[in-house]
């Protein structure tokens, strides 16, 4: 089927509290939604790039340009495209995994809505609810971190992830472990902030019974991650390094990680994300679904992915109110520490036009 219309819908969504990581502070999301209309069906995909190129090289202003001038024109020129073909169609453009993911997700959503199928069933997901984890940003003081953790546990979150960086690590984790007791699932994420020389220091985290340490070293440091893994008892998990199913297979073969964080945006789409799930399952490597502070559009799709059987660890999938005062879809809410996987056609949710208007969303039509 040919595309009747393609547009980019852009808006800024303030965060309820600033979110600090080892790479910087975020006060808001700058969101681009890819909206396609094909065969009478709408499809929506979220671009998860940050405002600045700090988590990865992609950032929203550049994403808008790449989507408008390089990716979507290829989609329009091809005319008749299925979601399964989008990856191949966009492959000549190097990089831009997050932008490509948004395009593929929108086409997939439209295709599934047109045939009244859910993304969950299409991907092969089986579970109906997903244990919700929460990612806790860095704070000035340990007391502030403890207060935030207390609040999230009171909300019902099933797993705490602490952001760490050099100077805010062992003491912080010790205080949180002492506060929450031995039974609450706890893990840490360094977002590339350490080097291999920190191995002995990071080994001090072994005493806190962490589920995993996420991405301690640089994205390109697969060999160094393997060397670090041999000096720690805590399992290593990779996030930024896992840019494709091939990268996942390499990381596993090298012994660079024992667990993989899967984010569709980071790997160029939901179909590549499923291939990573399959590669990891074949190697006995547990996976979990990461998060990029998605609106309800990206969150709904991630829930479908996280319902696949290999996702055996709690996801960075939190309730809408963890991040936003008002989400652009119906809010996702915690029920007994879980989020429910949408079952409607496609991703099962759509943006509320009134909310988009109130946010001053700007629409750019893409024409051939
Ligand atoms: C991670 N996410 O796992 C990322 C990092 C991250 C939930 O910890 C804007 C866009 C802000 C993307 C902040 C979580 C972001 C972002 C943090 C991604 O490493
Ligand atoms: Mg991470």
Image (cartoon, helix red, strand yellow):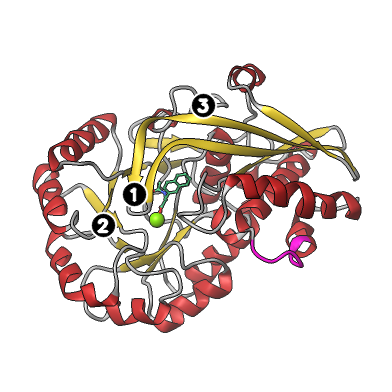
Residue 200 image offset from top left, x and y in percent? 16, 75
Range of residues picked out in magenta: 90-95
Q: In front: mark 1 or mark 3? A: 1
**Residue 47 shows which numbered tag?**
none
User: Ligand 2 sits in which quadrant?
Assistant: bottom left
Give the secondary structure at mark 2. loop
Image point 11% across, 64% down: which residue? 207
Pointers 1 and 2 in contact (C-beta within 8 Å): yes
Residue placed most toward the observer, 150 or 15: 15
* Viewer-proximal residue among 149 and 63: 63
Closer to the chain start, of discs 3 and 2, is 2
Q: Against 236, is 228 above or below?
A: below
Mark 1 to mark 3 CA distance (whole Å): 22 Å
Rounded to the nearest whole Å, what is the CA distance between mark 3 and mark 2?
30 Å
Residue pointed to by mark 3: 327
Q: What's the distance in space between the residues labelled 1 and 2, CA to CA?
A: 8 Å
Residue under the image location 64 percent in, 19 percent down: 357
Relative image position of residue 180 (x, y in whole percent): 14, 43
| Residue tagged 1 | 21
- Classified by dominant secondary structure, the portion drawn in magenta counts as loop
Query: Along the polypeptide, which appears first: circle 1 or circle 2?
Result: 1
Work out whether 263 lies above or below 140: below
Question: Residue at position x 48%, y 22% from top?
Answer: 326
Badge 2: residue crowd in 10 Å (few <14, some 14–19, many ≥20): many
Q: Classify mark 3: helix, strand or loop.
A: loop
Q: Is mark 2 within 8 Å of ligand 1?
A: no
Membership of 176 in magenta stretch: no
Q: Is mark 1 within 8 Å of ligand 1?
A: yes
Quick one: 203 or 363, which is closer to the camera? Answer: 363
Residue 165 is marked as: 2
Where disc 1 sits, the SS reads: strand
Q: Is-magenta flag for residue 93?
A: yes
């Amino acid at each position: 089927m040919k595309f009747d219309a393609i547009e980019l819908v852009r808006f800024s969504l303030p965060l309820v509290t600033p979110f600090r990581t080892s790479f910087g502070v975020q006060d808001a999301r700058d969101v681009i939604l890819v909206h396609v209309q094909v065969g009478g069906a709408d499809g929506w995909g979220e671009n998860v790039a940050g405002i600045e190129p700090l988590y990865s090289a992609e950032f929203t202003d550049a994403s808008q340009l790449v989507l408008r001038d390089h990716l979507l024109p290829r989609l329009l020129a091809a005319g008749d495209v299925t979601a399964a073909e989008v990856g191949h169609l966009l492959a000549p453009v190097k990089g831009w995994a997050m932008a490509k993911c948004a395009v593929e997700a929108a086409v997939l959503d439209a295709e599934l809505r047109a045939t009244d199928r859910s993304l969950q069933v299409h991907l092969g997901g089986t579970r109906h609810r997903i244990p919700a984890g929460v990612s806790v940003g860095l704070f000035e003081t340990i007391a502030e971190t403890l207060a935030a953790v207390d609040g999230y546990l009171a909300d019902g979150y099933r797993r705490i992830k602490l952001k760490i960086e050099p100077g805010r690590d062992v003491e912080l984790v010790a205080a949180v472990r002492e506060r929450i007791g031995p039974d609450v699932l706890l893990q840490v994420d360094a977002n590339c902030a350490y080097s291999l020389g920190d191995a002995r220091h990071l080994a001090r985290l072994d005493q806190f019974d962490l589920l995993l340490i996420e991405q301690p070293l640089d994205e390109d440091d697969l060999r160094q991650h393997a060397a670090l893994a041999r000096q720690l008892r805590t399992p290593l998990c990779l996030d930024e390094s896992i840019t494709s199913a091939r990268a996942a297979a390499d990381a596993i073969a090298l012994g660079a990680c024992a667990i993989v964080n899967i984010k569709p945006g980071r790997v160029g789409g939901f179909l590549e994300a499923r291939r990573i799930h399959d590669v990891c399952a074949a190697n006995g490597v547990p996976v979990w679904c990461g998060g990029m502070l998605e609106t309800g559009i990206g969150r709904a799709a991630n829930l479908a992915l996280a319902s696949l059987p290999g996702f055996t660890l709690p996801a960075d999938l939190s309730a809408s109110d963890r991040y936003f005062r008002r989400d652009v879809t119906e809010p996702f809410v915690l029920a007994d520490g879980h989020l429910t996987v949408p079952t409607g056609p496609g991703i099962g949710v759509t943006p509320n036009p009134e909310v988009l208007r109130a946010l001053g969303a700007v629409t750019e039509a893409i024409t051939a």
